[in-house]
Image (cartoon, rainbow, N blue to C red):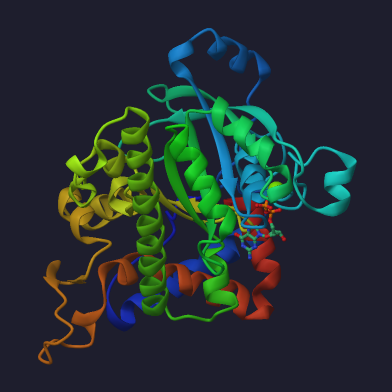
Amino acid sequence: MISFLFIRRCSGSFFQFSCVLSLVCIIILLKVHSSLKVKEMSRVEPQQLLELQNHVEKIRNFCILAHVDHGKTTLSDSLVSSNGIISARLAGKLRFLDSTEEEQKRGITMHSSAIALMYRLEDKSGGDAGESQAAEEYLINLVDSPGHIDFSSDVSTAARLCDGALIVVDVLEGVCTQTHAVIYKALRERMRPCIVLNKIDRLIVELKLTPAEAFQHLRRLIEHVNALAHTLVRSELMKELEETKQEVSSINLDDVDDHPLIIEWTFSPEKGNIQFASALDGWGFGLMKFINYYHKKLGLNKGILKKYLFDDYSINLQTKKIIKIDYLNSSLTAEQRVPMFVTLVLEPLWEIYSLLILQSSMQPALELMKEKVSL
Ligand SMILES: Nc1nc2c(ncn2[C@@H]2O[C@H](COP(=O)(O)OP(=O)(O)O)[C@@H](O)[C@H]2O)c(=O)[nH]1
Ligand SMILES: [Mg+2]
């Protein structure tokens, strides 16, 4: 997954200029030195995977669950390409885990397929997993599952086998019937969940939302997912009580906010169980990526960033002062009303897309950039 190492953020018009300039420089560099390797996916050898298989504590079984067409197979392609099994350029097009002829012909997943991948965890706080010696290596058995209801038995089997679930949600379509079903399945199997908010690019390219509108859209979607998950957890707790023949009325289900299952099934970017992605364009990030980046780049405190980055707080990049946004307070300037997530994360992303996609003259540059920096 891409690290946005090339995003530079200063303030005001100087930022606009420097950001655009740095991107143009990257593109020119890539054009002039097409052999320049920014981040080459190294191929993981089968021997490395076999060695990891001897360490049970290093093995994780994950499945990708979602409503049909929300991007499971495309996301699998990106993850497969991270091990150098397919090229980053083909990720999203090849649909590697749709391995049968019928699946390729119909363009849908009909059976679960699994693949063993290696994952290097360099920094437990969410930093880049790279090639360093200190990186911890894990064997991830990744299962791509079908989204269509007709094949739901395959989803149940995958859920039974796995420890964790990547639940993909298309940010445009939002929570759909099968999202509901797979969240419930994952909950019943007590899987560790992570929500992948996929197709963020559609907010830019199709909906043409501004970064501020997209932030509100994403927040509403997360609230929606949480509301659904909590309802399902409550009904699951009810079921458990009934099964153990306990008196349901003796327990107030409105009072279970600190139940471990509710905590596990509460999603928020700062907890690390929400990831933002565009599987098709081959990038994805969690909040920690940007927290680490801005901690290094601007010297901002990690704890403070974690607490306020995805909330109604704005930042003045010159004074590094963070203030709560009171939307009713008319004395706040326009800049003071822009949430930090918009300023530090979404605006740079929007600028990259605007530069590389919306201006069609830059299309060849995008292709080159996708190849070289996995964007
Ligand atoms: N714009 C956009 N399209 C995507 C993205 N991820 C997947 N798609 C498209 O969504 C469609 C369904 O994707 P697929 O991976 O087959 O979904 P699945 O049914 O959940 O496995 C395909 O046409 C993909 O190209 C994304 O991040 N952005
Ligand atoms: Mg699929």
Instruction: Locate the C terminus by quadrant.
Output: bottom right
Q: Residue at x 46, y 67 (%)?
A: 349
Q: Residue at x 28, y 55 (%)?
A: 294
Q: Residue at x 12, y 71 (%)?
A: 323
In this rendering, would 217 be left or right of 141?
left
Q: Report the front residue among 209 and 282.
A: 209
Q: Quadrant of residue 117?
A: top right
Up-down relation of residue 91 to residue 365 (above or below):
above
Up-down relation of residue 229 to residue 23 (above or below):
above
Q: Position of residue 155 (x, y in %)?
A: 63, 38
Q: Position of residue 267 (x, y in %)?
A: 34, 51
Residue 1 visible here:
no
Q: Report the front residue among 202 and 136.
A: 202
Count of marks placed on residues: 0
Up-down relation of residue 255 to residue 8 (above or below):
above
Q: Residue at x 33, y 41 (%)?
A: 238
Q: Report the front residue among 274 and 33.
A: 274
In the image as oriented, which residue stretches furthest toward the bottom? Answer: 330
